[in-house]
Image (tube, rainbow, N blue to C red):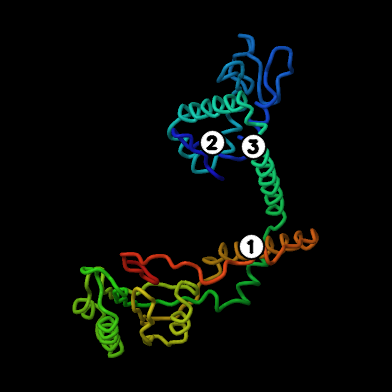
Amino acid sequence: MEQIRWGRGYWLASGPLVAGLLVSLAYGQTAGEKPPAGATPSPAPAAQASSPDKVVLKVGDMSITQEQIERAIRNLTPQAQNNLAHQGRKAFGDEYVLMLVLSQEALSQHLDSTPAYQDMIALSRLKILASQEYQEILKQVAVKPEEVSTYFSGHQSEFEELQVLQVVVRQKPAGAKEGTPGFTPEEAKARAEEIRKAFVAGDDPKQIADKYKMQNVVRVDTQPFAVHRGAMRGDLEKAAFELKPGGVTEVFDLGQALAFVKVVSHETEDLKSVSTRIENTLQKQKIDSALDALKKNAKVWMDDAYFAPPAGPPPQAPPKETIQIPVGPK
C-alpha cells in the first residue's frame, strides 16, 4: 500500500480510506443538506457513551466517529498497525486531522474539479477494484496437502541442497581509485588459483584461511553452509551440483570478485521443511493461471510498437565499494 507523507507522518495510505474520505468530503455539509455517508452530525450528549457511533474527532462541521477511525486503522499496513499498537492513537489522530484539513482546503479551492484529481480518482478506483478481485482469487486457489506431496515427489532435484565451503577474492574494477580494496584481475586470478590448489590438495580450511584471508579482500570459509538451487549464479551452481562430495569447482569470475566452492556433502530436504515453499509455488501457479485466463477472456490487445522495450542495453549501475558475496553467510 502506497504511503502518503505530508511532512509529519505516514500513517494514512492512498487506498480505500483516502478515496472514500475525499468522496465524502466532496458532498459538503452546508445547512439543509443531507450529511454524506462517512460524516456524522454532532450527537446529543446522551449518545456520547463509548460505542461505534461515538464522535471522537471534529474538524469544523465534520464529525468523525469511533467506528470510522477503527475502519481507517484496519486499512493500515500490518507494520503501521503494529507501530500504532505500541505508540497509541495520538499521532494517527493528528495525521487524520491533517488529512481532513488539507482535503477541506482543497475542496474550497475546487481542486476536486481538476483533470488531475479526476484521473487520480479513476486510477484509485481501478486499483481498489483490482485488489478486491485479487483477494477473491486468493480465496479460490487453496492448495491441498496431497498436491504438495505430489509436487515434492515429482521435483526431488529442486530440494537438493549442498553443504559447501566458499572462497571469494575481490578484484578491483578497471580505473579504480587508489586505495580501493582488492587485487588487480591478474593478481586476483593468481591468488584464487593458489587457494583453490590448497583445497584440492585437501589442506585444512582453517589453515588455508589463516594463511590467505584478508579483510574485505579475501574470504575463506572454514565452516560449511547450506545452499539451495537458485542461490548461486547459474554456471557456478551447475558446476557445484554436478560435483561429488570433496570436489572443488573451477574459479568463476563474478565481476567484482572471483569465487569457487568446495562441496562438502549433498543432502535432500524433507517434505516437512519445504511444504510451505511448495504451497507458495503451487498457489502462485494457480494465481498466474487464473490471471492468464482472465486476460485471455478479456481479449487484450497491445500496441507492440508503443510498448516496445527501450533500444540498446539497459544502463549499468555504478559498481559498489563493498565486496559482493555470491552466496553464504559473511
Residue in the picture at 25% in, 82% down: 187
Which mark, by number, is residue 117? 3
Three-letter code for the amino acid on which mark 2 is drawn = Leu
- Count residues near mark 1 (Cα–Cα under 10 Å), then give few for <14, some for 14-19, many for 20+: some
Q: Which residue is identified by label 1?
A: 284
Give the structural element (helix, strand or loop) at label 3: helix
Pick the front one: 298 or 278? 298
| Rendered view: 248 above or below 217 | below
Q: Residue furthest left?
A: 211
How far is disc 3 from disc 2 in space, using C-alphas? 18 Å
| Rendered view: 136 above or below 30 | below
Give the quadrant of residue 106: top right
Three-letter code for the amino acid on which mark 3 is drawn = Tyr
Looking at the image, is mark 2 or mark 1 earlier in the sequence?
A: 2
The mark closer to the camera, 2 or 1, is: 2
Q: Which residue is identified by label 2?
A: 12
Residue 215 can be seen in this image: yes
Looking at the image, is mark 3 or mark 2 earlier in the sequence?
A: 2
Which mark, by number, is residue 323? none
Give the quadrant of residue 247: bottom left
Do the CB atoms of the residues marked 1 and 3 lie less than 8 Å apart? no
In the rendered view, does 38 fall on the left or right side of 267? right
Give the structural element (helix, strand or loop) at label 2: loop
Do the CB atoms of the residues marked 3 and 2 lie less than 8 Å apart? no
The quarter of the image holding the N terminus is top right
What percent of the width, then of the height, locates residue 260?
36, 81
In the rendered view, does 140 fall on the left or right side of 244? right
Residue in the picture at 47% in, 73% down: 228
Q: Residue furthest bottom?
A: 201
